[in-house]
């Protein structure tokens, strides 16, 4: 393995064995007149200003308190850098509003400067999941580009329709090669909660959308995988709350686990998963065109590092390649790894560890060198 920086070695030690002594504090940020909380994590005894990172969470109920995000942030701070993790309350409420990414990052950078903990230099930005492509695109905005040294995206998407197609069907492709992978139903629950009623033929399906929002919130609060039998009773109860004629539509988004006695759609007039994916993507783009990040990504000229789990069940790894293709003006590297899925570490791949661990360490080293 090539020689790694001391930062990378400290990060790895903190991830495995727990962080060194850190100071964690909360601050309030001003995001265009809205007060949002944020966490700052820094090394204990820090006497001088340090390199800094802004870390953006995804569409998740815990927000900045997400267990894997906290672990990542603490490991990052253990390398001698300051991290700030702002909450996006709208994302915690499972609303897909990408336009809030840039003002949140801007507020976080101001917050860092105000504390005096961060050096007066461009910062690194990390985006996870839904927030990843929009965090990357923020580096292409004139008002932010000079403040950002580089960006890292974990588990992000490059195209909205292909992502929705995977969420609904389990199919994804890149350069003519089709892959099939079990999709995490959490993704389609959130997408339908936000956009189902904006599809003209489903404008009256507010009961389905609300039931799926409730289900996604329960999954976010519970923390168990979204296909776990723990949600079977909730799914059955929510299905019963939907008008009978719309239950086949509900079934396309949510069914009990295999052990819970799943029910198949019974109405042949219901859209196919592919038709629903297309309708949801059209609705999303009509409501907020910035949900497709391509235009913003094309303006980015800061270095970008992309990490994606090969076995990601929420956003498929092929989206990392779409992100790379959209970043035409910059230095961008992609690492697809079997060491983690979407928001949690996968069982350690003993058989491929000799290949996976060194490659992951090199990719991590590249990320930590950005600031």
Image: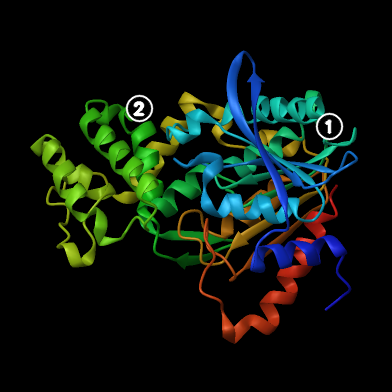
Which of the two discs, 1 and 2, sits closer to the camera?
1
Q: Is residue 78 left or right of residue 28?
A: right
Q: Which residue is mark 1?
A: 147
Q: How many marks?
A: 2
Left/right placement of residue 171 relative to residue 54 reads left
Indicate the quadrant where residue 226 lies: bottom left
- The residue sitting at 69% across, 59% down in the picture is 19
User: Residue 150's quadrant in the figure?
Assistant: top right
Crowd tier of the residue under label 1, counting other residues whose Cα lies within 10 Å: few below 14, some 14–19, many 20 or above: some
Q: Position of residue 220 (x, y in %)?
A: 39, 46
How much space separates mark 1 and mark 2, taking CA atoms?
37 Å
Where's residue 124, x and y in %? 78, 43
Residue at the extreme left of the image, as rendered? 244
SS at mark 2 in the image: helix
SS of the residue under disc 1: loop
Which residue is found at the position 74% from the left and 72% from the top? Answer: 359
The numbered disc on residue 198 is 2
Q: Residue at x 84, y 50 (%)?
A: 370
Q: Earlier in the sequence, mark 1 or mark 2?
A: 1
Question: Which of the pair 231/145 is nearer the observer?
Answer: 231
């Amino acid at each position: 393995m090539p020689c790694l920086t001391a930062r990378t070695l400290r990060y790895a030690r903190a991830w495995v064995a727990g962080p060194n002594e850190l100071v964690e504090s909360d601050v309030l940020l001003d995001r265009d007149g809205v007060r949002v909380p944020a966490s700052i994590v820094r090394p204990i005894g820090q006497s001088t200003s340090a390199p800094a990172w802004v870390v953006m969470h995804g569409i998740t109920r815990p927000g900045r308190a997400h267990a894997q995000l906290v672990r990542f942030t603490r490991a990052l701070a253990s390398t001698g850098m300051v991290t700030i993790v702002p909450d996006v309350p709208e994302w915690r409420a499972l609303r897909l509003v990408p336009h809030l990414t840039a003002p949140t990052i801007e507020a976080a950078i101001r917050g860092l400067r105000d504390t005096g903990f961060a050096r007066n230099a461009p910062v690194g930005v990390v985006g996870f999941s839904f927030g990843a492509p929009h965090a990357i695109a923020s580096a292409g905005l004139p008002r932010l580009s000079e403040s950002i040294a580089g960006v890292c995206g974990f588990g992000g998407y490059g195209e909205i329709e292909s992502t929705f197609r995977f969420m609904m069907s389990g199919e994804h492709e890149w350069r003519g090669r089709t892959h099939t992978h079990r999709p995490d139903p959490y993704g389609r629950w959130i997408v339908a909660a936000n956009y189902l009623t904006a599809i003209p033929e489903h404008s009256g399906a507010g009961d389905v959308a609300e039931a799926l929002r409730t289900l996604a919130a329960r999954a976010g609060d519970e923390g168990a995988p979204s296909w776990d039998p723990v949600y079977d009773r909730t799914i059955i109860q929510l299905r019963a709350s939907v008008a009978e004629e719309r239950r086949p539509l509900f079934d396309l988004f949510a069914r009990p686990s295999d052990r819970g006695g799943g029910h198949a759609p019974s109405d042949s007039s219901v859209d196919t998963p592919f038709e629903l994916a297309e309708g949801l993507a059209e609705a999303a783009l009509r409501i907020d065109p910035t949900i497709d990040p391509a235009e913003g990504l094309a303006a980015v000229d800061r270095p970008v590092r992309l990490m994606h789990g090969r076995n990601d069940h929420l956003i498929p790894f092929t989206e990392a390649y779409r992100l790379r293709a959209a970043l035409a003006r910059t230095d961008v590297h992609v690492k697809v790894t079997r060491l983690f899925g979407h928001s949690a570490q996968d069982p350690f791949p003993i058989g491929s560890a000799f290949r996976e661990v060194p490659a992951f360490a090199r990719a991590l080293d590249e990320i930590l060198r950005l600031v």
